[in-house]
Image: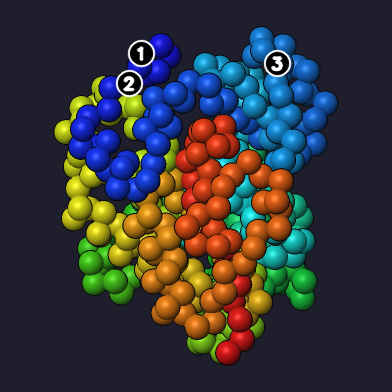
Amino acid sequence: MEESSKLALPDAFLDFLNVNGLDPSIYTASDSTPRYIRLKPGCEAYLEEVEAEMKCKIEKVDWLPGFYSLPPDIQIASSKAYQEGKIYGIDAASGAAVLALDISAGDHVLDLCAAPGAKLCMISDLLGDSGSVTGVDVASHRLAACRTMLQKYALGDRCRLFVGDGTTFSLLPVGFHSESKSCESALEEKGDAFREWTSRRPYKERKKATKARKTVASQLVLGSQHPELIFYGRHSGVVGLTRSELYQSGCDSEVSSQGYDKVLVDAECTHDGSIKHIQKFEHWGWTTLRRRVLDAERTDSLTTLQLKLLSNGFRLLKVGGSLVYSTCSLTIAQNEDVVQKFLKENASAELQEINAAKTWPCKSGQIPNTLRFDPLTSQTSGLFVAKFLKLAI
C-alpha cells in the first residue's frame, strides 16, 4: 500500500481534477480509507467470530445500520464469514444510496443497473418477506454474478432479474398470484405458464433459452426484443404467468398507479470516484485512463446514457414514489449537470431532501439536496447521490 500512497498522477488527470474542483489528495492519501462490510440481518451473534477470523477490530459504523469498518488492507473474499454468506463486501457510500430510498415493507423496487449485486442484496434484505425487487442490467455476465449472489445469500424469493437495456426497459411490477390462488392452480389453468425457477432445467427448456439468447443478440440493435428473464423467485410474481402476461407493458396511466414504489439508478460512469479503481491505472497504463476517463467523446456518450437511464427509471415510478440517482464519479458533468437537464425535462420531478443524511459524513453537491461522498470528507469511496419525488401533474 505504500506505493499507492505516493501515486504520481499524470498532468492530464490533474487538469481534469482542477476543472471539476476536486482535490488531488483524494487520490494520493486514500490508504486510510477503511474497507466496509455489511452484516447479514440475523448474523449479529457471529460478529466476534468474524473479528477473530479477520484478526482485527471491526468498528460499527454509527451512521449506517448494519455496516462495519475494517482496516483497508484486510481481505474478506477468502474468509469463512464471507463464503458462508454472513457478510457482504460493500462500501458505506453505496449503502447510503440504498438507504436513501427509504424502503418500506411491501414496496416494489426497481434496480435499473443492478450488477454486480451488492446493492440489490441490500434492497432484498430491507424488504424481507414482502414486496418485490426487479434487477435489470445490460451485461449478461455481470447479471449472472448478481444471480449467484442472490442464491448465495438466499435472497431470491421475491426477486426477478432481466438482461436488458435500462434506457428502454418497460415492465411494471407484477402482482403476487399466491394472494389470490395457489401457484399450482394457476399452472393448471395455463400450461405454458412459468413454473418455479430452477438452474437444472430440462434439455428442451435449455435449448429454447439458448435460441432465445441468440435471438436477443441478433435483434438487440433493433431494440425490438424483450429483455431476457434469467432468474425469478417463487414469490416474485412470475410463477403462473404466461410469457405474454409477463412482457405486457403498461400505459402512462397504469404506471402512475401501478409503477414501482422505489427506483435505484446507480448509473454507468467513468468510476473516477472509486479511488482504488483509479490507482489500478498505474498498472494498466495512464493511456488507458485517458481513454476511459478523460476522453471528452466518451464522457459525452456517458452523460447521454445517464440521462436516458434516469429518465426511464423515473418514467417507471408511480406517482408519490421516490428515485435515487447515484454515480461513483465526482465530476460535475455526470452528476449535477445530468440532474439539471433531467429537472428541466420533467415537470413532475422534485428533488428531495434525504432525511437520513443529516447524520451522514458527506457534503452538499452544487445543487441543494444533492450529496457527495469522498475519502477526505467521508472516509468512503467517492459517490454522488440525488433523490427525486414523482409528483402528480
| Kind of residue sitting beneath label 2 | Leu
Residue at 24% in and 40% down? 15
How many callouts does the rendering have? 3
Q: Which residue is mark 1?
A: 3
| Kind of residue sitting beneath label 3 | Lys
Task: Compare residues 117 and 338 and report the one nearer the observer.
Answer: 338
Question: Mark 1: few, some, or many residues within 10 Å (few <14, many ≥20)?
Answer: few
Q: Which residue is mark 3?
A: 57
| Kind of residue sitting beneath label 1 | Glu
Marks 1/2 in contact by CB < 8 Å: the verdict is yes
> In screen coordinates, is 120 left or right of 42?
left
Residue 30 horizontal/vertical position (percent): 46, 25
Q: Secondary structure at mark 1?
A: helix
Q: Secondary structure at mark 3?
A: loop
Task: Compare residues 276 and 210 and report the one nearer the observer.
Answer: 276
Residue 293 horizontal/vertical position (percent): 27, 43
